[in-house]
Amino acid sequence: MPSISTPAGLQSAQAGGGATGSDVIGPMKEVIGQVQNQTAEFSGMLTNQTTTGQSEMAEMLKLQRAVALETMMYTAVSNLEKARTDASKGAIQNMK
Amino acid sequence: MAKLADIKPDIGQLKFLCEAGQCLAANNRFSLATEIFHAVIALSPQRAIGHTLLGDACFNLEKFDEALKHHQKAVQAEPDNTFARVHLGEILLFKKQKDKGIAELKKVLEKDPNGPDANLARQLIKASEMGLFTKI
């Protein structure tokens, strides 16, 4: 049978067998408190940009945008150079 | 010694000089190219091409004011020459005179929309819209 890890107080209450209601409620409250704390901690982690990678994602998107812009500029300059060469060649060839 | 005015080069010789100058310019020997283009202008001052190629060499030597002067002379020499006008538009864009530059480039597009000069004009307009000339 799989065992469930519980606080020491609850384990002792289960092990004792004939524990009263108040013996069980105390450790149960402790467990609930712990679970609530962990849930709060987890929800905090979900909204934290550092632990979810949101900030990394934002940086990555910024970088991606910068690279795309640079590529676009490079292509524009490259096309410009080709067009300049073609225009010069054409102008010389078409001299009459 | 023959006077310059006595030398009447034929079109083939002028083309050869222009191509030689362009070859030198393509190999970054702009000063030598400049001398050749000065010779082209001296031999055929009524043509725009010598002025334009000289302006282009000056542009590559980062002598922008001088380049503008040569490109303006080229357009004066041949107002209908799209090669001269597209280069005037280009230098105006480089000198941050965007409106004037675009106006010259649009004239090129109207005059010969399918030629290589129009293609250069289109590329220049596109680059200008991308803000390329404001970054330089």
Image (spheres, coloured by chain):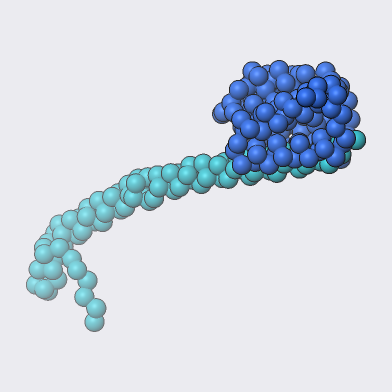
Vertical position of residue B2 compared to residue B118: above or below: above
In the picture, one chain is blue; tell me its letter.
B
Query: Can residue A36 be seen in this snapshot?
Result: no
Would you identify the image quadrant in which residue B7 lies? top right
Q: Residue at x 39, y 50 (%)?
A: A53
Q: Residue at x 9, y 68 (%)?
A: A12
The reply, left or right, for residue B15 in relation to residue B91 is: right
Residue B117 picture location, percent across and down: 80, 36
Vertical position of residue A6 compared to residue A57: above or below: below
Would you identify the image quadrant in which residue B103 lies? top right
Question: In front: A63, or B127?
Answer: B127
Question: In front: B96, or B38?
Answer: B38
The reply, left or right, for residue A54 in relation to residue A20 is: right
In the picture, one chain is cyan; tell me its letter.
A
Residue A20 picture location, percent across and down: 12, 65
The reply, left or right, for residue A45 in relation to residue A6 is: right
